[in-house]
Image (cartoon, grey):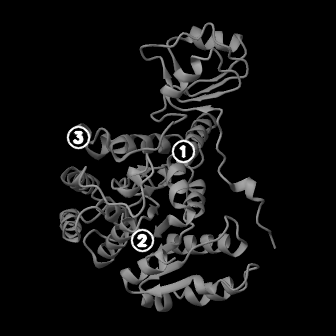
Amino acid sequence: MPSPPPADVIEPHTSHDEIETRAEFERRLATGSLAGLTVQGLRLDLDPAPDLTGVEVAGTLFVGCRFANREVGADLVRRGANVVPPFSGLPYPTQPSHLYTPDDLAAGFADGGFAGMYDTRVYEHFRAHGGALPDVREALGQRLHDHGVDNALVDATRAWLAAHGPQSVVGVMGGHAVPRGSAAYRMAAVLGWELARADRLVVTGGGPGVMEAANLGAFLAAWPAEELTAAIDLLATAPDFTDHDRYTAAALAVRERYAPGPTLPAQRPAASGTEWARSGGLAIPTWLYGHEPANLFAGRIAKYFSNAIREDTILRLARGGIVFAPGRAGTVQEVFQAATKTYYGTDGASGAYVFLDRAYWTAELPIESLLRPLLAASRFGDLSSTVHLTDDVREAVRVLTAG
């Protein structure tokens, strides 16, 4: 039986040697030394281009940065720096310094429709270069991109976790094919709305269906419940995600109608830089499922090429519990992937497992009968009490926000 890895193996590390913003770069540059630092994904070709000729750069790593010309990079290498330039011909950054926003993914829709969106163009490139089994050059670009997203995700969530703790992050899983306007969609949207209003960071897999609904609820948390209903009714005019252009256009129309919107009163002082967390939460999708339109209601989007990294990341973050709405094979896989982490204590203490729709999870897919005995046998004691089945969204919220 495997034992959980040491805490330092899985704990996100905070490095003070990484420079990811131009402001931090200029501050370090003023000291006359960048030695031993890592400079990630900066546009050092934009005016005013920095003068690096007299700066100490021994052991400095420039990864995914752009310079005014090739000679700048060559000179850095001659003076002891390591330079990994951005790969040419890629539609995505090889070292993104921040998470995506809905506007980033939807860029190009106004002129080119769904086919012209940044999100779609990256997906088509992904497919054209081997998909999940890319050629070596593409694989290196994708791995660098996903590492940048890893870094950006740690940066984006650090302030929230410091202020609210890991038990404040709640995952929401469920079927991608749930149509807008359906009872299941509305239930998931109310769940996201209630959780965000209770100072919980809502995390989803970033797809359509239940995932979009939960982020939509968090996006509209500062609005009254009747406005959430109105927004769902607008979205329901384009219920099917396979109708890509209408589906995306409806989402953008709702965003335009309700953003920026009122401010959600915090139950505790909000940490600087966490406003996005309380206006849409977090989505963690993957281009492996790029045929599905982007979920445009999350406050920040950590989009990966690797589906395995993405799934593990969602479950690692959701220490405050996970809600499982009805879904099929993908959702069942997530249930037992999460249960494995809980059983072995891989990421520390887990929150509640809340299953929405009691009949579905006991009769149609009787997961409860498998999950309770498994968690009862955990090396950390009987954890079967973490499993909850309910048909009531507000009961689910009470379970997830207790204590």
Do the CB atoms of the residues marked 1 and 2 lie less than 8 Å apart?
Answer: no
Number of other residues with Cα within 10 Å of mark 1, as a class: few under 14, some 14 to 19, many 20 or more? some
Q: Residue 175 carries which label?
A: 2
Q: Residue 155 carries which label?
A: 1
Q: Mark 3 points at which residue?
A: 110
- What amino acid is found at the position of numbered circle 2 in the picture? Gly
Q: Position of residue 238 (x, y in %)?
A: 22, 62
- Tell us which disc is closer to us: 1 or 2: 1
Do the CB atoms of the residues marked 2 and 3 lie less than 8 Å apart?
Answer: no
Badge 3 element = helix
Badge 1 element = helix
- Tell us which disc is closer to us: 3 or 1: 1
- What amino acid is found at the position of numbered circle 3 in the picture? Ala
Determine whether, in the image, residue 200 is placed left or right of residue 35.
left
Chain-order first, disc 1 or disc 2: 1
Number of other residues with Cα within 10 Å of mark 3, as a class: few under 14, some 14 to 19, many 20 or more? few
Chain-order first, disc 3 or disc 1: 3
Q: Which residue is depicted at the point 50% across and 30% down? A: 21
Q: Position of residue 275 (x, y in %)?
A: 38, 51
Give whichever of 306, 152 is nearer the camera: 152
Could one spot residue 305 in this view of the protein? Answer: no
Q: Which residue is depicted at the point 62% across and 36% down? A: 140
Q: How far apart are marks 2 and 3 (CA)?
A: 29 Å
- What amino acid is found at the position of numbered circle 1 in the picture? Asp
Give whichever of 220, 126 is nearer the camera: 220
Q: Distance between the residues labelled 3 and 1?
A: 31 Å
Residue 373: which quarter of the image?
bottom right
